[in-house]
Amino acid sequence: MQEQYWQAVENNDASYDGTFYYAVTTTGIFCRPSCKSRVPKREHVRFFPDRQSALAASFRPCKRCRPDGIRLPDEEWTAELARYIDEHYAEPLTLGVLAERFYASPSHLQRTFKKVKGISPLLYLQDVRMEAAKKALLAADLPVNRIGAQVGIANAAHFATVFHKKTGVTPTEFRSNTHPNDTRSMAGMQEGGGDR
């Protein structure tokens, strides 16, 4: 039976949903067989006949496949992901980090986020970082490279390149051409946008 269950996990077989649940000892998470998360190593997997058994063994329900209830619709899941990016943009976020955090494969996360938001998660992250950078450039007299590092782009040249691509001006030009009480401000700069 264990081998049959393992095949179901490997194949994300939804026909086994409700028949058993599997938990991953390295993450402390339990899932439905149909979960789209990355397939774990076989030696890290435990099988349970029901949710209660997995919970009793101190495993937490997966946030993607929601084995403890109704699965999140793509829109709601994407909103949670966007909220996470909004709150953690200064951290070293990559597609792999986000996929691990949200219990999905990088390709599934990328495809779903882009379908719902019309933009990839990494371009969304860039936009959030640039908005934070604009605010910091206007609010503080910090060197440009410090502001880049504050918003999650430690490489000053890369920060300046991304900023210019998104706004049409360099960070220094933005700071010197935009005054806190100047209402021509960011809206005009944003129209320069960036490729999506």
Image (tube, rainbow, N blue to C red):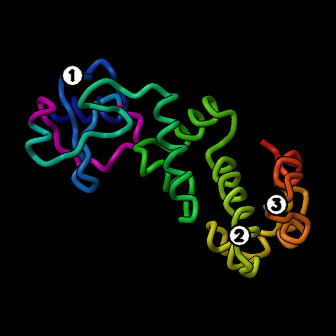
How would you rate the neighbour count of disc 2 (Cα within 10 Å): few for under 14, some for 14-19, many for 20 or more?
Answer: few
Q: Residue sitting at 36 percent across and 30 percent down? A: 12
Residue labelled with disc 2: 139
Q: Quadrant of the C terminus?
A: top right
Q: Amino acid at mark 2?
A: Ala
Which secondary structure, mark 1? loop
Mark found first going from the N terminus, 1 or 2 = 1
Residue labelled with disc 1: 18
The one of 12 and 146 positioned closer to us in this rendering: 146
In the rendered image, which quarter is residue 162 located in?
bottom right
State the image coordinates of residue 123 (x, y, percent, origin top left): 69, 49
Q: Compared to 175, does 78 lie above or below?
A: above
| Residue 184 left/right relative to 77 | right
How would you rate the neighbour count of disc 1 (Cα within 10 Å): few for under 14, some for 14-19, many for 20 or more?
Answer: few
Q: Residue sitting at 34 percent across and 28 percent down? A: 34
Which secondary structure, mark 3? loop
| Residue 189 left/right relative to 87 | right
Which stretch is magenta?
Answer: 35-52
- Mark 1 touching mark 2, by CB under 8 A? no
Q: Residue sitting at 64 percent across and 74 percent down? A: 149
- Mark 1 touching mark 3, by CB under 8 A? no
The one of 175 and 41 positioned closer to us in this rendering: 175
Which secondary structure, mark 2? helix
Mark found first going from the N terminus, 2 or 3 = 2
Mark found first going from the N terminus, 1 or 3 = 1
**Callout in the foreground (2, 3):** 3
Residue labelled with disc 3: 181
